Amino acid sequence: MPKVKIFADSTCDLPQEWIRDYGIGIIPLYVTFGDTTYRDGVDISVAELYAKVDKTGSLPKTAAPSPADFVQAFSPDIEAGRDIVYISLSSELSSTYQNALIAAEEFPEGKVTVVDSLNLSTGIGLQVMKAVKAAEAGKSAREIAELVTSVRPLVETEFVIDSLDYLYKGGRCSGMQNLVGSLLKIRPVIKVIDGKMTPAYKVRGKREKALEQMLNNALVNRDQMDPDLIFVTHSMADEDAQELKRILKEKTGASEVAVSDAGCVISSHCGAKTIGILYVKKP
């Protein structure tokens, strides 16, 4: 068993079997509808989340784990003599990172190392998998944190949002933008830049056109891609994800192109049929 345990939160969107097989600790964020709060991926599924949005007509609120949640999650491994590296959701998007830092102060110095991913979804997951492999190779917590920090600016994260509805309901675009966007079939493409969700460009027309543009954007960098792992991450768009996986595998020769499902927190901000391509560039 590695001497360093790798933790992430539920927004890393890694496949459940990977989380189990690699022994990754996951700390869930919270999703709240009215007076009821659910743990992301534990008490509520993405299908259930969308059903509740359709029924209520409003989006849930999302919240970070508390410092106490982190202390509770970290304590068993610390007591077992292991060090911890926790890779968080971007500090630009959530207080998750700050709350983990507060929790780390409850343990002896150096036992818990907190790294800001400056990313979301499998943009975090790519960094987590680098950390997992380093831990398996016997690297120290400090060495793993340095590795993740060096990989962090090389992560490319791009998503096609199928509808402006969730951005509108979440207050991220105006009613007029939503109306015009719906009439013109405009699909925004989001990139993560400096830890923030940034509108990169918009594609007008059929969904296939937007997916083709995103795929082409990735393939332009095929020679610069780290060949170890590419993610196609989606919310209720498995057919499109599998087709993107097939093409990426054929065109890049990557060792692994993995499809993963976006969790409730990511889905509640982006909506159904959101789909992204995420990879690491070579140094």
Image (cartoon, rainbow, N blue to C red):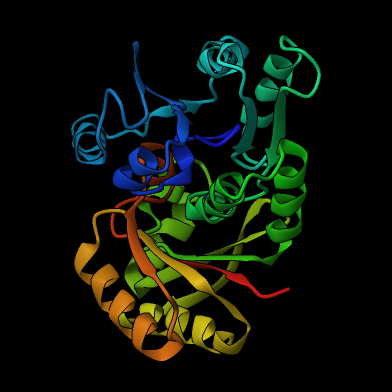
Residue 269 place in picture, x, y as percent: 44, 44
Toward which corner of the image does residue 135 lie, by quadrant?
top right
Q: Which residue lies furthest to the right in this view?
A: 109
The total number of labels drawn is: 0
Q: In this view, does 267 lie to the left or right of 242?
A: right
Q: Which residue is at a point 65% across and 46% down the rendered structure image?
A: 117
Q: Which residue is at a point 71% across and 37% down the rendered structure image?
A: 141
Q: Which residue is at a point 22% across and 63% down the rendered structure image?
A: 238
Residue 81 place in picture, x, y as percent: 62, 18
Q: In this view, does 193 lie to the left or right of 262?
A: right
Choose between 34 and 211: the one closer to the eye.
211
Q: Is residue 246 left or right of residue 23?
A: left
Q: Which residue is at a point 45% across and 49% down the rendered structure image?
A: 167
- Let me know if residue 213 appears in the view: yes
Query: Which quarter of the rendering shows the C terminus?
Result: bottom right
- Let me know if residue 274 appears in the view: no
Residue 264 place in picture, x, y as percent: 35, 38
Residue 41 place in picture, x, y as percent: 32, 32
Toward which corner of the image does residue 223 lie, by quadrant?
bottom right
Looking at the picture, does residue 217 appear above or below residue 256?
below
